[in-house]
Image (cartoon, rainbow, N blue to C red):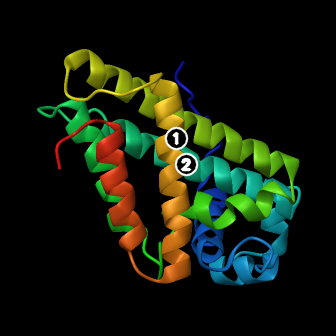
Amino acid sequence: MNSAITIETNPVRDYILATGMRIMAGKGFSAVGLNEILTAAGVPKGSFYHYFGSKEAFGEALLERYFADYLAELDATLCVPGLTMAQRLMNYWQNWQDTQSFHDCQGKCLAVKLGAEVADLSEAMRHALQRGTSGITDRLARAIEGGVAEGSLSVNGLPVEVAQSLYQLWLGASVMVKIVRHTQPFATAMITTRHILHLCP
Protein backbone atom coordinates (compact mmCIF):
# COMPACT_ATOMS: atom_id res chain seq x y z
CA MET A 1 0.00 0.00 0.00
CA ASN A 2 1.28 3.46 -0.95
CA SER A 3 1.60 5.47 2.27
CA ALA A 4 0.89 8.88 0.78
CA ILE A 5 0.80 11.93 3.04
CA THR A 6 -1.64 14.72 2.15
CA ILE A 7 -0.72 18.16 3.49
CA GLU A 8 -2.35 21.56 3.48
CA THR A 9 -0.63 24.23 1.40
CA ASN A 10 -0.64 28.01 1.79
CA PRO A 11 2.26 30.40 1.07
CA VAL A 12 2.39 31.95 4.55
CA ARG A 13 1.83 28.63 6.30
CA ASP A 14 4.48 26.99 4.14
CA TYR A 15 6.98 29.75 4.91
CA ILE A 16 6.42 29.44 8.65
CA LEU A 17 6.93 25.67 8.38
CA ALA A 18 10.08 26.04 6.26
CA THR A 19 11.53 28.54 8.73
CA GLY A 20 10.71 26.33 11.70
CA MET A 21 12.13 23.28 9.97
CA ARG A 22 15.43 25.02 9.33
CA ILE A 23 15.77 26.24 12.93
CA MET A 24 14.58 23.04 14.62
CA ALA A 25 16.83 20.88 12.46
CA GLY A 26 19.71 22.60 14.20
CA LYS A 27 18.38 23.14 17.73
CA GLY A 28 15.66 20.56 18.28
CA PHE A 29 11.99 21.08 19.16
CA SER A 30 11.97 21.99 22.84
CA ALA A 31 14.85 24.48 22.61
CA VAL A 32 13.08 26.62 20.00
CA GLY A 33 10.36 29.05 21.05
CA LEU A 34 7.61 30.33 18.80
CA ASN A 35 8.98 33.88 19.01
CA GLU A 36 12.26 32.76 17.47
CA ILE A 37 10.44 31.15 14.54
CA LEU A 38 8.09 34.08 14.03
CA THR A 39 10.90 36.62 14.21
CA ALA A 40 12.95 34.68 11.67
CA ALA A 41 9.90 34.30 9.41
CA GLY A 42 8.88 37.93 9.85
CA VAL A 43 5.25 37.14 10.63
CA PRO A 44 3.07 38.20 13.59
CA LYS A 45 1.95 35.75 16.26
CA GLY A 46 -1.64 36.06 15.03
CA SER A 47 -0.60 34.59 11.70
CA PHE A 48 0.89 31.59 13.47
CA TYR A 49 -2.27 30.85 15.43
CA HIS A 50 -4.37 31.31 12.31
CA TYR A 51 -2.66 28.21 10.85
CA PHE A 52 -1.59 26.28 13.95
CA GLY A 53 -3.53 25.88 17.18
CA SER A 54 -0.43 25.25 19.27
CA LYS A 55 3.28 24.53 19.11
CA GLU A 56 2.41 20.82 19.17
CA ALA A 57 0.11 21.23 16.17
CA PHE A 58 2.91 23.12 14.44
CA GLY A 59 5.33 20.29 15.19
CA GLU A 60 2.92 17.73 13.78
CA ALA A 61 2.44 19.79 10.61
CA LEU A 62 6.20 20.28 10.32
CA LEU A 63 6.82 16.54 10.46
CA GLU A 64 4.06 15.87 7.93
CA ARG A 65 5.61 18.39 5.53
CA TYR A 66 9.08 16.96 6.06
CA PHE A 67 7.97 13.40 5.32
CA ALA A 68 5.85 14.44 2.32
CA ASP A 69 8.95 16.04 0.76
CA TYR A 70 11.15 13.13 1.80
CA LEU A 71 8.83 10.51 0.33
CA ALA A 72 8.54 12.45 -2.93
CA GLU A 73 12.35 12.48 -3.20
CA LEU A 74 12.52 8.79 -2.34
CA ASP A 75 9.91 7.96 -4.99
CA ALA A 76 11.96 9.85 -7.57
CA THR A 77 15.15 8.06 -6.54
CA LEU A 78 13.51 4.63 -6.79
CA CYS A 79 12.09 5.38 -10.25
CA VAL A 80 15.22 6.64 -12.03
CA PRO A 81 15.21 4.97 -15.48
CA GLY A 82 18.07 2.87 -16.79
CA LEU A 83 19.17 1.51 -13.41
CA THR A 84 18.57 -1.74 -11.60
CA MET A 85 16.61 -1.56 -8.37
CA ALA A 86 19.79 -2.44 -6.48
CA GLN A 87 21.52 0.59 -8.00
CA ARG A 88 18.58 2.83 -7.10
CA LEU A 89 18.59 1.61 -3.52
CA MET A 90 22.33 2.15 -3.17
CA ASN A 91 21.91 5.66 -4.63
CA TYR A 92 19.36 6.34 -1.89
CA TRP A 93 21.77 5.38 0.86
CA GLN A 94 24.64 7.19 -0.83
CA ASN A 95 22.49 10.33 -0.89
CA TRP A 96 21.66 9.77 2.80
CA GLN A 97 25.38 9.68 3.57
CA ASP A 98 26.09 12.75 1.42
CA THR A 99 23.33 14.95 2.85
CA GLN A 100 23.49 14.16 6.56
CA SER A 101 26.59 15.54 8.17
CA PHE A 102 27.34 16.14 11.82
CA HIS A 103 27.58 19.90 11.19
CA ASP A 104 24.44 21.18 9.44
CA CYS A 105 21.97 18.79 7.86
CA GLN A 106 19.76 21.73 6.70
CA GLY A 107 16.52 19.89 7.35
CA LYS A 108 17.61 16.64 5.74
CA CYS A 109 17.81 14.79 9.04
CA LEU A 110 14.74 16.07 10.87
CA ALA A 111 13.57 12.55 11.78
CA VAL A 112 16.94 11.86 13.37
CA LYS A 113 17.04 15.23 15.13
CA LEU A 114 13.51 15.15 16.53
CA GLY A 115 12.62 11.46 16.67
CA ALA A 116 13.61 10.53 20.19
CA GLU A 117 12.81 13.97 21.59
CA VAL A 118 9.25 14.51 20.37
CA ALA A 119 8.13 10.88 20.60
CA ASP A 120 8.17 11.36 24.38
CA LEU A 121 6.55 14.81 24.27
CA SER A 122 3.54 14.39 22.02
CA GLU A 123 1.41 11.49 20.84
CA ALA A 124 0.32 13.48 17.79
CA MET A 125 3.92 14.08 16.78
CA ARG A 126 4.86 10.50 17.53
CA HIS A 127 2.10 9.32 15.21
CA ALA A 128 3.33 11.72 12.51
CA LEU A 129 6.79 10.19 12.86
CA GLN A 130 5.33 6.70 12.74
CA ARG A 131 3.34 7.44 9.58
CA GLY A 132 6.33 9.01 7.91
CA THR A 133 8.82 6.30 8.74
CA SER A 134 6.30 3.62 7.76
CA GLY A 135 6.02 5.32 4.39
CA ILE A 136 9.77 5.06 3.98
CA THR A 137 10.05 1.41 4.96
CA ASP A 138 7.02 0.49 2.81
CA ARG A 139 8.76 1.96 -0.23
CA LEU A 140 12.07 0.32 0.61
CA ALA A 141 10.32 -3.03 1.03
CA ARG A 142 8.68 -2.75 -2.39
CA ALA A 143 12.02 -1.76 -3.92
CA ILE A 144 13.79 -4.71 -2.31
CA GLU A 145 11.04 -7.03 -3.51
CA GLY A 146 11.44 -5.61 -7.02
CA GLY A 147 15.20 -6.06 -6.87
CA VAL A 148 14.79 -9.68 -5.86
CA ALA A 149 12.34 -10.24 -8.72
CA GLU A 150 14.69 -8.75 -11.31
CA GLY A 151 17.71 -10.55 -9.84
CA SER A 152 19.79 -7.46 -9.01
CA LEU A 153 19.87 -8.30 -5.29
CA SER A 154 18.87 -11.03 -2.86
CA VAL A 155 17.93 -11.12 0.81
CA ASN A 156 17.48 -13.55 3.63
CA GLY A 157 14.02 -13.02 5.06
CA LEU A 158 10.97 -11.00 4.10
CA PRO A 159 11.58 -7.74 2.18
CA VAL A 160 9.56 -5.75 4.73
CA GLU A 161 11.72 -7.04 7.59
CA VAL A 162 14.91 -6.31 5.66
CA ALA A 163 13.65 -2.80 4.83
CA GLN A 164 12.91 -2.09 8.49
CA SER A 165 16.31 -3.40 9.57
CA LEU A 166 18.14 -1.30 6.98
CA TYR A 167 16.25 1.87 7.86
CA GLN A 168 16.97 1.31 11.55
CA LEU A 169 20.63 0.69 10.70
CA TRP A 170 20.90 4.03 8.93
CA LEU A 171 19.03 5.92 11.64
CA GLY A 172 21.47 4.50 14.17
CA ALA A 173 24.42 5.41 11.95
CA SER A 174 23.13 8.98 11.70
CA VAL A 175 23.02 9.28 15.48
CA MET A 176 26.52 7.83 15.83
CA VAL A 177 27.87 10.27 13.23
CA LYS A 178 26.66 13.11 15.43
CA ILE A 179 28.26 11.54 18.50
CA VAL A 180 31.68 10.71 17.05
CA ARG A 181 31.86 13.72 14.71
CA HIS A 182 33.08 11.77 11.69
CA THR A 183 31.43 9.70 8.97
CA GLN A 184 32.85 6.25 9.70
CA PRO A 185 29.43 4.99 10.94
CA PHE A 186 28.04 5.71 7.47
CA ALA A 187 30.87 3.77 5.85
CA THR A 188 30.13 0.83 8.14
CA ALA A 189 26.39 1.09 7.40
CA MET A 190 27.12 1.04 3.66
CA ILE A 191 29.23 -2.12 3.97
CA THR A 192 26.53 -3.79 6.07
CA THR A 193 23.82 -2.74 3.61
CA ARG A 194 25.69 -4.29 0.69
CA HIS A 195 26.19 -7.44 2.72
CA ILE A 196 22.49 -7.68 3.61
CA LEU A 197 21.48 -7.21 -0.05
CA HIS A 198 24.19 -9.65 -1.21
CA LEU A 199 25.86 -7.08 -3.42
CA CYS A 200 29.51 -7.27 -4.41
CA PRO A 201 31.77 -4.64 -2.78
Question: Residue 22 location in percent, x, y?
Answer: 57, 72
Name the residue type under label 1. Answer: Ser
Q: Residue at x 35, y 47 (%)?
A: 193
Tell me if I can see residue 52 in this picture. Answer: no
Label 2 secondary element: helix
Q: Residue at x 60, y 42 (%)?
A: 133
Name the residue type under label 2. Answer: Gln
Which image quadrant for residue 186? bottom left
Neighbour tally class for label 1: few under 14, some 14-19, many 20 plus, Cα within 10 Å = some
Question: Residue 46 location in percent, x, y?
Answer: 85, 68
**In the rendered image, which residue does mark 2 sit on?**
168
Q: Reply above or below: 29 against 11.
A: below
Q: Reply above or below: 70 against 85.
A: below
Q: Reply above or below: 36 against 54.
A: below
Q: Is residue 123 left or right of residue 76?
A: right
**In the rendered image, which residue does mark 1 sit on?**
165
Q: Return the residue nearer the eye: 34 or 101.
A: 101
Q: Is residue 192 left or right of residue 165?
A: left
The answer to whether mark 2 and mark 1 are in CB contact below 8 A is: yes
